[in-house]
Amino acid sequence: MPGNVALREDLRAYLDSVLDAARFRDYCPNGLQVEGREQVRRIVCGVTASQALVEAAIECGADTLLVHHGWFWKAEDGRVTGFRKQRMARLLAHDINLFAYHLPLDAHATLGNNAQLALRLGWTVGGRFGEQDIGFVGVPPAPTLAGELARQIETALGRTPLLIGDPARKVTRIAWCSGGAQGYFEDALATGADVFVSGEISEQTVHLARETGMAFIAAGHHATERHGVRALGAHLMEKFGIDCEFVDIDNPV
């Protein structure tokens, strides 16, 4: 039950294993990004390791922060100055571990963002698509219309999505990939899906949706990636018996 203690290295090894982190070619390092206390008693989970989430972890008395979007992204400025210094200084001053899992947490078959999105909307997973099998494809509980699907997503995620395409388009097959996966549109189209659901949409993707006839629902990057890390935190609480709290830092994108 919550209140137990886990060793940081045991937690690291378990997370790396259960999420199969070594399998992925990613845009950032997955796993333990900043080393803090050896003993883990309380974890705060969140989508992004922002300053606000770091402060929330400090306020909660956490010794570990677990996120989907961590630090040290490829092609970004690697110098620890400005806001990067402020974030890291606060984390180090309070000896807090930072664990981050990006693509591994999108792809996981049960705990991942895409699996959790399907769970909340009642979609049955039938396959994968896209680079490293990140995207999911499946069917809704019953044939529906694109406009009705958008309303269901709004209810499930608490955010009004953007629908590009005919609201009356019949939907019997759905392709989806959380976050900023608009670049997977053509891969989604190749699955034979009637609609592609992702977090974001780009200017050129609007034209692709109009020209191909496949609907596109942009449901929000943050909104589509809240539930994976939350499920992972709940799993760790059950597995290790340590306290774990999800903190949702509001983000309209």
Image (spheres, grey):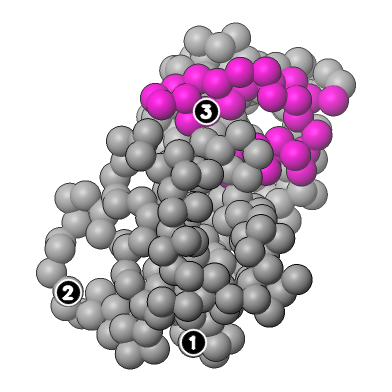
Quick one: 73 or 61, which is closer to the camera? 61
**Disc 1 target residue:** 58
Specify whether 140 is left or right of 72. right
Question: Relative to 200, does residue 125 appear above or below in the rendering?
Answer: above
- Residue 231 coordinates in the image, percent (x, y): 66, 54
Quadrant for residue 140, please give it: top right
Q: Residue at left 47%, top 25%?
A: 133
Q: Residue at left 39%, top 89%?
A: 94
Instruction: Give how far apart the Cα atoms at labels 3 and 1 are.
Output: 35 Å
Amino acid type, callout 1: Ile
Q: Residue at left 66%, top 58%?
A: 239
Is residue 198 among what the camera can see? no
- Foreground disc of the pair 3, 1: 1
Instruction: Give how far apart the Cα atoms at labels 3 and 2 are.
Output: 34 Å
Query: Which numbered disc flags the more N-terminal residue, 3 or 2?
Result: 2
- Residue 44 coordinates in the image, percent (x, y): 56, 73
Disc 3 secondary structure class:
strand
CB-based contact (under 8 Å), mark 3 and mark 1: no
Quadrant for residue 45, please give it: bottom right
Residue 11 drawn in magenta:
no
Residue 137 drawn in magenta:
yes
Amino acid type, callout 2: Val
**Disc 3 target residue:** 135
Residue segment shown in magenta: 113-141
Quick one: 116 or 65, which is closer to the camera? 65
Question: Relative to 60, does residue 67 appear above or below in the rendering?
Answer: above
Q: Residue 198 carries which label?
A: none
- Residue 69 coordinates in the image, percent (x, y): 42, 57
For the N terminus, the image quarter is bottom right
Is residue 194 among what the camera can see? yes
Q: Residue 80 carries which label?
A: 2
Question: Relative to 190, does residue 147 appear above or below in the rendering?
Answer: below
